[in-house]
Amino acid sequence: MDFVNAIILLLNYIFIPALTYGSQLALGAIFVTLIYGILRFANFATGDMMSFGTMATILFTWYFQSLGVSLGVLPTALLAIPFGIIFMIFYMLLIDKFVFKYYRNQKSPPVQFAMVSIGVMFVTQAVVRIIIGPGDRRFFDGEKFIIKAREFKEMTGLNEGLALKSTQVITIFVTIVLVSLLFWFLNRTKTGKSMKAYSDNEDLALLSGIDPKKIVLVTWVIAGILATIGGALYGLDKSFKPFTYFNNMLPIFAAAIVGGIGNPFGAFLGGYVIAFSEILLTYAYKKFFMYILPESMEPNSLVQLLSTDYKFAVSFSILVIVLIYRPSGIFKGKVL
Amino acid sequence: MRKNLNVIAAYSIMMVLILMVGIFQSWNIALSIFNLCLISAVMTMGANIQWGYAGLINFGIMGYTALGGLAAVLISVDPVQEAWRAGGFDILMALWLIVVMVLVIRFILKRFEKSKIRTYSIAAIIISGILLIRFSAEPGIEAIEAVDPAKTGFLGGFGLPIIFSWIVGALFAGGLAFIVGKVALGLRADYLAIATLLISEIVIAIIKHEDWLTRGVKNVIGLKRPAPYEVDLQTTDWFIKLVEKFNSGKLSVIENLADRKAALNQLVIEGSSVFVKLCYSGLFLVVVIILLILTQKALYSPWGRMMRAIRDNEEAANAMGKNVVKQHLLIFILGSAIVGIAGAMLVTQDGLFTPGSYRPMRYTFLIWVMVIVGGSGNNFGAILGGFVVWFLWIEAAPISLFLINFFTAGIPETNALKAHLIESVPYFRFLLMGLGLLFIMRYRPKGILPEKIEIK
C-alpha cells in the first residue's frame, strides 16, 4: 500500500506537472527551432510573440463570454484559439514584411537578426502591455478538475490524493495532436519536405525550384499556430502575465538547444528534458522516502537537492553543460 | 575640430535637453537623469569594448551589474559579528571545500589524458562536492539567517568606504567573466548571446536566494554614502549661506522676515538634494572621463588595431600569429569589469541593493539598445547612446502623455479608449525603444555616431 502511495505521490507532484509544463515548453521550443532552422536566427521575441498570441486569444475569449457562448465543461478559450492564431499569424507576417524581410534579402549575419529581434521584442512587449496591461489575467472557465484529490482518496482508500486538472489533460492532449500533425506535415507533404530541404541547404533548395517566399510564409504560419497554442495552454494552466511569458523564453531556448537546434523532434523532447529535470531536482522527496523506507530509516531533512528558487537555474545549467560538451544538442541538430 | 563637429553637436543637443528638463521640470529630476546617464555611459563603454572593439556579444550585462552591486554591499556594510559567530565557520569551511574541489579538478585535468572516465569522474566530483557543501553548510546558513532576520540575517561586509567597492566590483565582474569566457567564448555569436543571458540569470538567482550573503529579496538598505546626507546639509551653516547667496535676488523681494525665513528653508531643503546629486555627478564624471581616456588610448594603440583585426577577420588575425582565444578572453574580462564598476556605482547612488530589481530588460537589453543606437566601436557614440536612450527611457512617459493628449484633444476625458491609453502611458517607453532600435538598425546601422578610425 505504501508503495502505491509513493507512486501516486510522484505522479501527482512530479510526473503530471512536468508533463504539462514540458508540453508547453515543447511547443515553444519547436517554434524557436523552426525559426532558427528555416529563417536562420535566434528569435529573442519568442516569449513576447507567445504572449501576443495569448493576448489575442484572451480578448476573443472575453468577447465570446460576453456573447454567452461557451463550450460547457471545456474552457471557452479553446473556441477562441483559432481566432487568436489568425491574429498572431497576421502580426507575424506584418513584422516579417516590415522588419525581417529586409535583412533576409541583405543576407545579414545571424547576430544582426538577433539584434533586430530584440527590437521586435521591445515593440511586441509594448503592444501587449498597452492593449491588455501588465497584470495577471485568468481566463479559464468550465470545469476545473477532472479528478479531485479528495474524491480520489475516497475512491481508492489511499492516503495520497491524485488531482487531475482539466487544463493538464487538455494541454497534453492538444500537444500530442498538434505535434503529430506537425511531424506528419514536415515528413509527408511536399511543402513540409521542401521546408526541410530549405533548412538543410538553402542554395540547393532554391536551385531545385523551391519558392523561398512560400517557405517563409508557411514557416510563419506554423510558428503562429505553435506560439498561440503554446502560450494559450500555458495561460490556461497557470495565468497570463506578460512578464512571465518573457521569462519563459529562457527555458524555451534551453529546450530548443538541448534538443539540438533546427531539429523539431529534438526540441519536442528537449521541452520534456528541461521540465522533468527542473521538477525532479527541486522536489522535496521526504514524503516519498517516508513511504518506501522502513520507519527507522526515515530522513530528517527535506531530501531536496536544490531549493525551488533555483528552478530556472537548473534548466540554464543543463543548457550550459550541453553547450560545452555537445553543442549540437542531445539529438544532433546543426553544429553551432 | 571640423571632423568632430557632429560629436560636439550631438553632445550639445543632449546637454540642452537635460538643461531643459532642469528648467521646465525640476533640477532634481534633471540631475537624477544626468547621473543615471553617466552610469549608463559606463555600462555602454563596457559593452562597447566587447561588441564594438572585438565583436563579442555579451547578453550577460545584468549579471555583472548585479555583481558590482553585491561588491558595494560587501565592502560598505559593517560586519555582523553575531552572524559570523553563529555560522561564519561553516561558511568558511564551505569556501575551503570549493577551493579544494577546484584544485582537485585542475589536478585531474592536468594529470590525466582526455577520456570518458575523466569526464565522468569530474562530473561525479562536482556533483558530490555540491551535495557535500550543501549539507555541511546548511546549519551554518540557517544560523546566520536566524540572526535578527528583520534587520540583518546575513554576514555583512567589511565596513570600508563604499568607493572602494567600485574597484572590487570590477574585480568581481572580471572574475565571473573569466569563468564565463573560459566556458562559453568558443560558441558561435548567437549562442554566445543565449549562453551569457542564461548565465546572468543564474547569477541573479544565486544573489536573490543566498540570503546569508546578500539578504536576498529582503534587500539591503541604508548603505553608507560617499556624499553628505541631506539632513546634515540642512543644518550646516555654510550650506545655508550658500543657498542664501545663490537665491539673494529671489529672497530680497520678500519683505516679511518670517516669510523670507520660510522661503529660505524651502530652498535649503530643495538645494540640499540638488547638492547631493551634484556630488554624485562629480564622482561619476571623474569615472567616465578616466574610462574614456583609457578606452580611447586603447582604441588607437597597437592593441586596439589588433582587436579590430580580430573582429573583422578572425582567421587572418590568427594566421598573423595573434592569439585570438586569449585576446577574446581578455577583452571579455575588461568589458565585464567596467560593467561591474557601473553596477557598484548604481548601488552607491541608490544607497540600497535590491536583487529583485535586476531584470534583463532594464540591465541587458536596454544597454544593448544604447550601444547600437549610439554607435558601436566609437566610445563617444556609445556614451551618447547611454545618454540619449536613458533620457528617452525616462522622458518617454511625459512625451507620450503629451502626444496622446494632443491627438485626442477633441475626444472627451471620459472616452474609454483615451482613458485606457493614458493609463498605459508607462509602456510607451518599450514601444519607443523598440522602434528606435529598429529604425537605427535599418537606416543607420552604424549608430548615431558611427565608428571612425583615423590612422595616426
Image: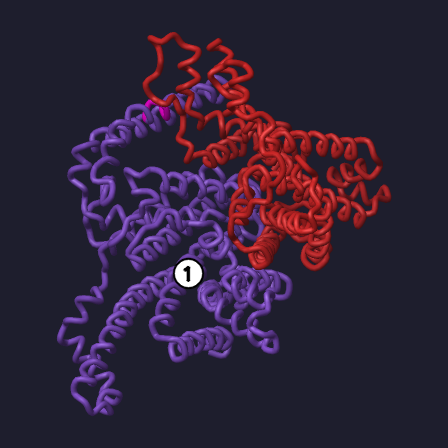
Q: Which residues are magenta?
A: B129-133
Q: Position of residue A199 (x, y in %)?
A: 73, 40
B209 in magenta: no
**Could you classify mark 1 by the number of other residues whose Cα lies within 10 Å: few (under 14), some (14-19), or many (20 or more)?**
many
Give the residue displayed 68% in from the left and 56% down from the top.
A95
Give the residue displayed 69% in from the left and 40% down from the top.
A78
- Figure check: B358 above or below A291: below
* Residue A297 appears in view: yes
Kindly state the secondary structure of the residue where label 1 is placed: helix
- Figure check: B253 above or below B319: below
Give the residue displayed 29% in from the left and 72% down from the top.
B274
Main SS of the magenta part reads helix
- Figure check: B51 above or below A252: below
The quarter of the picture where residue B285 lies is bottom left
Chain bearing mark 1:
B
Identify the residue under disc 1: B40
Q: Quadrant of the C terminus of chain A?
A: top right
The quarter of the picture where residue B133 lies is top left
Chain drawn purple, letter? Answer: B
**Hey, what amino acid is under mark 1?**
Ser
Q: Position of residue B18 (x, y in %)?
A: 41, 74
Q: Please tell me the colour of chain A.
A: red
Residue situated furthest right in the rendering: A209
* Residue B315 appears in view: no
Q: Position of residue A174 (x, y in %)?
A: 69, 33
- Figure check: B266 above or below A106: below
